[in-house]
Amino acid sequence: MEICPACGFQFGVSDDDEGHTYDSWREAWVKMGTPWSTKQKKPAKWDALALLETLTPAKKRAPKRKR
Amino acid sequence: MVCVDALRLDTESKLAHRQLVIRSIFFALLFLVSPFAARAISLLGEPEVELDATEATVRWKTDGPSGGKIRWGENDGTPDQTIKDGVGAEHRIKLAGLKPGTRYFYTVGTARDTIGKGSFTTKGTASAQPVPQSGAGLGKGGVPVAPKQNMLVPQTAPPTRVTWGSIASLQDHYDRHGADFSATSPDDYAAKAWIFREQALAQKLPMKLDGATVRVMNLRTRAFAAYNLNGTTKTYFRPRDASYWERQPCTPITTPPWVK
């Protein structure tokens, strides 16, 4: 049920209610230039693309998430 | 030459006609065996209903696989709730959040057609639960509010810092879902989520527990909330339809962990 402060995906809502997948949301977010998508404070040295590069295929399919 | 041409044209015409007939038969057969060929689905027997005070499970069988749908409500002819089921020849759908001792009317069918209907009366006594009635007790924006005479549910919530789990995320949740409940501010939204939690206890709304999250939903109003184990709110919103509840994982519970 948490909202990712970076990409704005809300677990349990963006997927279960609105029908988005992690992959489709991530792809759209990257295409938009990985904007910081919430009103929570962005970390000073936050680098979205560097973080995305650390994702393994397994993590991309089923990342750990809080609900 | 004319006779030859006429003969040739006649032969070509017959050949073209024959090809057209063959092609038509081919497509007709293709349509008949196609999965998209329309065929009326019929009910086998009558729906069966398992009853409880606040729940009812409706089961029905059809003579072929199809998507299932049940529509139900307290008024005959005007159902106000819909739940869909997957494709199959047997369907089993649980209706939760019902009022004890109350008659409900339902129809069952496919996505397109109604193939059966019936009614049932839940167990128990109708006088117990102070639940807002349809068309009455509606606040601003048509959002049902707890009846003022319901002394079991406080109408004033504790401060937001006490009721909301992650203060840093409250603004985002309010921006997305505050309008679902006509909330006027993040604090108002947080207060409404807390009051909903108290209403859920008083009205025995369906609850599920999954690890660190308690989920609650009013299937009639479609209000849904998720709470931490200590009772603070994670989120509060209104899903697009009541079938959202069926997709939630977890174990049904009657007493949340914050109630001692």
Image (cartoon, rainbow, N blue to C red):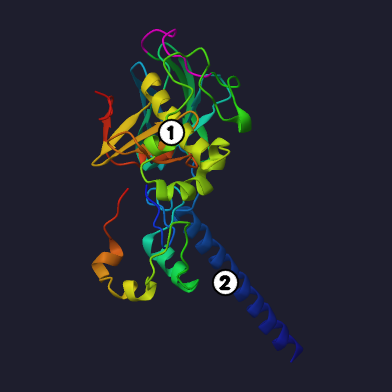
Q: Give the chain letter at badge 2.
A: B
Q: Which range of residues does the magenta coloring cover? A: B123-132
Cα distance between the residues tagged 2 and 1 = 80 Å
Q: Are marks 2 and 1 in contact (CB under 8 Å)?
A: no
B71 in the magenta segment: no
Question: Residue B84: where, in percent of width, then height?
Answer: 44, 38
Question: Residue A20: where, in percent of width, then height?
Answer: 43, 57
Q: Do labels 2 and 1 share a chain?
A: yes
Task: Identify the mark nearer the N-term, 2 or 1.
Answer: 2
- Asked whether residue B69 appears in the rendered view, the answer is no
> B238 or B93: which is nearer to us?
B238
The residue tagged with tag 2: helix, strand or loop?
Answer: helix
Measured along the vertical axis of the image, is residue B245 above or below residue B47?
Answer: below
**Residue B259 located left or right of residue B162:** left
Q: Give the chain letter at badge 1.
A: B
Considering every residue shown, the one lying at the far bottom of the view is B1
Query: Which residue corresponds to the image point at 43% horizontal and 60% vertical from the top-left?
Result: A41
| Mark 1 neighbour density, 10 Å: few (under 14) some (14–19) many (20 or more) | few
B129 in the magenta segment: yes
Measured along the vertical axis of the image, is residue B26 above or below residue B104?
Answer: below
In which image quadrant can residue B226 be found? Answer: top left
The residue tagged with tag 1: helix, strand or loop?
Answer: loop
Query: Which residue corresponds to the image point at 55% horizontal and 67% vertical from the top-left?
Result: B23
Question: Residue B210: where, in percent of width, then height?
Answer: 26, 40
- Asked whether residue A65 appears in the rendered view, the answer is yes
Q: Mark 1 points at which residue?
A: B159
Quadrant for the N terminus of chain B in the image: bottom right
**Residue B25 located left or right of residue B229:** right
Task: Give the amino acid type for the residue marked by disc 2 in the picture.
Answer: Gln
Q: Mark 2 points at which residue?
A: B19
In which image quadrant can residue B253 be found? Answer: top left
